[in-house]
Image (tube, rainbow, N blue to C red):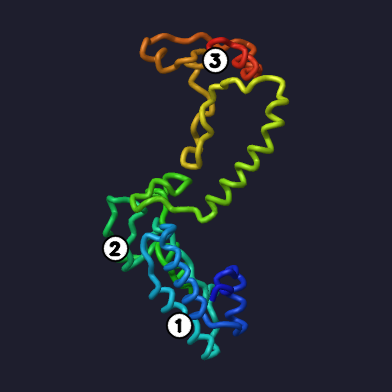
Amino acid sequence: MTELTNLTVAQIRDGFRAGDFSAREVAEGFNANVAAARALNAYIVETPDHALAAADVADAARAKGDMLLPLSGVPIGMKDLFCTAGVQTTAASHMLEGFVPTYESTVSAKLWAAGAGMLGKLNLDQFAMGSSNETSYFGNVISPWRRVMTAAMRRLRRAARPAVRRRRFPRGCARRRPAPTPAAPFASPLPSPAFRGSSRPMAAARAGASSPSPPRSIRRGRWRATCATAPSC
């Protein structure tokens, strides 16, 4: 079972068509993995019966010699953003908790028509407004790689320290706006013209003062060096 769950979608599809394993074996293997990994909080709702039913249909079609569908024998996890008939759909929000659609979304309908089975509804940021899976009403999704990545990042920090000591200038304190996330692709990368020369734009806004234009050195891109040597930084 473990080997089957390590296969790609294409390998599952081709192996099932070749008769190397049954679709039910694949579904049972993935259902077991989903149940064993509940601590990761990756699924809001689990639907093992849906995956098994689709697998049985695929096995029956192969046994009869019928033409198989593109995703026959392939179980998937459906993001809880898409409506699924008869299965709770919340978009990871408290507002939609308990909502059970009576209809299918276009995405899910096309996947079921192609022969796929559903393992469950995947957790996500509320209404998909985020990129880290940390705003779900049903709790954060835990990354199984978090400890490994943290240890790797510590090693990188230790390796980078000698290079940092050889830098010509200190880091300074360049006041930049954070890079826009995928949820805000049209955010302006620079402050508004009224605040570009002010180190405290909010205070300037409250006072109703208009800030002067930034020095030429800043406009020419030497902001870091200027800020690093300025006492106010």
Q: Residue at x 60, y 85 (%)?
A: 19
Label for residue 119?
Answer: none
Q: Which residue matches tag 2?
A: 100
Q: Position of residue 187 (x, y in %)?
A: 49, 32
Q: Which residue matches tag 3?
A: 233
- CA distance for labels 2 and 1: 25 Å
* Three-letter amino acid code of the residue under disc 1: Asp
Specify which label sits upstream in the sequence, 3 or 2. 2
Q: Residue at x 41, y 79 (%)?
A: 53
Q: Is residue 5 above or below residue 222?
A: below
The reply to whether discs 2 and 1 touch (Cβ–Cβ < 8 Å) is: no
The residue lying toward the viewer, choosing from 2 and 107, is 2
The reply to whether discs 3 and 1 touch (Cβ–Cβ < 8 Å) is: no
Q: How many marks?
A: 3
For the residue labelled by badge 2, is the local secondary structure a helix, a strand or a loop? loop
Q: Is residue 75 above or below residue 184?
A: below
Q: Answer whether residue 149 is visible to the viewer in this image.
A: yes
* Three-letter amino acid code of the residue under disc 3: Cys
- Looking at the rendered image, the disc whose residue lies closer to the viewer, 3 or 1, is 3
Q: Which residue matches tag 1?
A: 56
Q: Quick one: quadrant of the C terminus?
A: top right
* Lateral position of residue 30 relative to residue 155, left or right: left
- CA distance for labels 3 and 1: 67 Å
Q: Position of residue 221 (x, y in %)?
A: 65, 19
Q: Residue at x 59, y 47 (%)?
A: 151
Q: Position of residue 129 (x, y in %)?
A: 42, 45
